[in-house]
Image (spheres, rainbow, N blue to C red):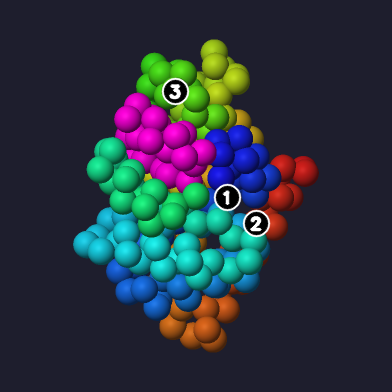
Amino acid sequence: MNAEAFRSEAARLALVPLFYDGDAARARATVAALAAGGATLVEYTLRGPGADRVLAELVENAPAGVTIGAGSVSDAAMADLALRAGAAFVVGPNGDPEVAERCFAQAVAYVPGCMTPSELVRARSWGCSLLKLFPVGALGGPAYVRAVRAPLPGLEMMVTGGVSMEDASAYLEAGAACLGIGSELVKRSYLDVDDGRPLAEATAAALARLRSVREG
């Protein structure tokens, strides 16, 4: 999935669910539940040993219409693992031009992590059309998004780090293109009953709420 296609779909949904689970079966169940709720983009974070192998399984077994990407990709070596596993997009906690080069060589979207206006503008110069503002909660939340976009209205940002559905409306109204939400949405307990139906229902509710804000 190239940078523009990813940006467009992420902005349409206004949500990219993200999670990590070292157990491949539970990870597949998580993706299935997210897909059942309407999520078409899922970020699997590479946070544990063997995570690239789980990612490869998720890519191979992805439900129809669901695109799987890799998160927590901090350097070129990790990017190589993610790309070999078949990640359709790559998200980092930081920005790295070598990661951008590797991703774009394979027509894979790269969403670099940034904190400051200078980092955001620099990452955009690499060809990244969607930029990750992280950790946005610690930086000031929606007020920080609004402050950054005032002089740089052309930036499109995925906000992550301390984001919950309770403040989702405020982030979108401040100008965020989409939200990256992890444990606030993808709760392990949701998978313990009804084949993950609680997670599917929570995902559907989140997408509906975000859609209402956008249409609002």
Under circle 3, the secondary element is loop
Tell me, for residue 207, which label it has, or none. 2
Q: In this rendering, does residue 52 appear at all?
A: yes
Residue 168 visible: no
Do the CB atoms of the residues marked 3 and 2 lie less than 8 Å apart? no
Q: Give 143 or 187, whichever is nearer the viewer.
A: 187
| Image vertical order of residue 125 relative to residue 109, above or below | above
Marks 3/1: CA–CA distance: 24 Å
The answer to whether residue 173 is left or right of residue 68 is: right
Picture quadrant of residue 58 = bottom left
Residue numbers of the magenta segment: 89-114
Q: Where is residue 124 in the image (x, y as percent from the top left)?
A: 48, 23
Q: Looking at the rendering, which quadrant does residue 8 occupy?
A: top right
Residue drawn 60% across the image and 19% down it: 153
Give yes or no for contact between labels 2 and 1 (Cβ–Cβ under 8 Å). Answer: yes
Q: Type of residue at label 2? A: Leu
SS state under label 2: helix
According to the image, label 3 marks what residue?
A: 126
- Which residue corresponds to mark 1? 15
